Structures are given as structure tokens and as C-alpha cells.
Image (tube, rainbow, N blue to C red):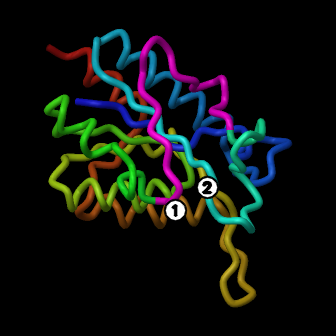
């Protein structure tokens, strides 16, 4: 088992260039997961998105917004995988890192529910991993489609619902932590 914490970076918090709804709460839950995995002696991998497109407006390398937020910052020697696409496996060393540790079960959390969480969970499933998604340790934002505003809560619920059908067991942070305590 391994915890993967995706894109809990400063640009997603108040004052950042892409503030998400509920990010402080999601990050606090990610921290609870991080602490629980560390206490259980299980591996944790952080994923950090650094923009590679010249027209990017957030996660610009070298800026404070691209840094992993202190709430869920890596501790000890936890690896940080840098990515440039929503899918945390695309053109990164994540798959090789997981294979080298013979990991087959993943717990995933982070941001954004409708982008990097969705694409990473689906990719992990396609690669043969068993995934658990801590829904309350993920955050997103309002979206607009054809002039209609879709509230962040609805975006999040729709993606968690879709992922729970086949790709992951979607549950709460407290459930994941309780399960870690079982022998």
C-alpha cells in the first residue's frame, strides 16, 4: 500500500492563481492520511505539477505558487514526482517507483478532482493498480459549460461518483485511517 498525494500546491489556496473550493479542508485531510501512513510505516509519494506550457497561469516553476503547501509537505525522505500533465504517470517516474517497491494498492488524494485526480486514478486502474480514493481529501472548483456554472460540490460529486463505478473504491479519510489500524 502507498499513499499518493497529488498537487497540494500553493496556487490552489487562497491568494494563489487557481484557488479551489474546500482546498484547506482537503489538504488537512491529506495531512491526516500522510501522518497515518507514516505511523504505519507505509510509503508516501508526493506529486508536484510544474507547468511546461508557455501560456500557463499557475504552477509556474520557480514561483511560490508551484511549491507544495506546508500542510501536506513531504517529510523525511518521501519522494516527490514532478509532472507536466494531469496524469501523474505520463512522462514521469511514478510507475517505475511503484514497481520498484512492488506496490499494487494505492490510496490517492489531492487536487483537482476533475483533472489530475480523475486522470491519475483512471490511469492507475488501467495499469493494474487497486485504488482507494479519499474523496474528502480532494478539492476542485466551479466549472462553466455552455454558459452554465457547475458548482464545485457538484463537479466533485460527479467525478467521485464516476470513479467509484469501476476505477476506485471512493471513501472518506477517516475510513482509510481506521483501516490502516486494523491488523
Mark 2 burial class by Cα count in 10 Å: few <14, some 14-19, many 20+: many
Image height check: is 70 above or below 153?
above
Q: Where is residue 79 in the image (x, y as percent from the top left)?
A: 42, 27
Q: Which residue is drawn at 37% across and 26% down?
A: 44
Specify the quadrant that holds the C terminus.
top left
Q: Where is residue 99 in the image (x, y as percent from the top left)?
A: 18, 38
Image height check: is 128 above or below 13?
below
Does the magenta portion include 71?
Answer: yes
| Nearer to me, 62 or 112 | 62
Residue contact between numbered discs 1 and 2, judged by CB atoms under 8 Å: yes
Residue 154, quarter of picture: bottom right
Image height check: is 65 above or below 162?
above
Residue 94, quarter of picture: top left
Residue situated furthest right in the rendering: 15
Q: Residue at x 45, y 54 (%)?
A: 117
Q: Position of residue 91 (x, y in %)?
A: 39, 56
Query: Which element type, helix, strand or loop, lies under badge 1?
Result: helix
| Residue receiving disc 2 | 140
Q: Which stretch is magenta? A: 67-86
Q: Residue at x 77, y 60 (%)?
A: 57
Q: Identify the mark at residue 115; answer none if there is no mark.
A: 1
Mark 1 burial class by Cα count in 10 Å: few <14, some 14-19, many 20+: some
Amino acid at each position: 500500500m502507498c499513499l499518493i498525494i497529488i498537487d497540494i500546491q500553493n496556487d490552489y489556496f487562497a491568494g494563489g492563481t487557481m484557488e479551489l473550493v474546500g482546498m484547506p479542508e482537503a489538504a488537512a485531510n491529506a495531512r491526516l492520511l500522510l501522518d497515518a501512513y507514516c505511523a504505519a510505516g507505509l510509503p508516501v509519494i508526493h506529486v508536484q505539477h510544474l507547468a511546461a506550457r508557455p501560456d500557463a497561469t499557475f504552477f509556474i516553476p520557480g514561483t511560490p505558487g508551484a511549491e507544495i503547501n506546508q500542510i501536506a509537505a513531504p517529510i523525511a525522505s518521501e519522494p516527490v514526482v514532478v509532472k507536466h500533465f494531469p496524469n501523474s504517470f505520463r512522462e514521469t517516474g511514478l510507475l517505475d517507483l511503484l514497481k520498484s517497491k512492488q506496490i499494487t494498492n494505492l490510496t490517492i488524494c489531492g487536487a483537482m478532482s476533475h483533472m489530475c485526480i480523475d486522470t491519475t486514478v483512471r490511469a492507475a486502474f488501467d495499469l493494474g493498480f487497486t485504488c482507494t480514493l479519499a474523496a474528502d481529501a480532494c478539492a476542485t472548483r466551479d466549472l462553466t459549460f455552455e454558459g452554465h456554472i457547475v458548482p464545485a460540490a457538484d463537479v466533485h460529486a460527479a467525478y467521485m461518483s464516476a470513479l467509484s463505478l469501476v476505477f476506485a473504491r471512493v471513501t472518506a479519510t477517516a475510513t482509510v485511517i481506521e483501516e490502516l489500524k486494523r491488523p
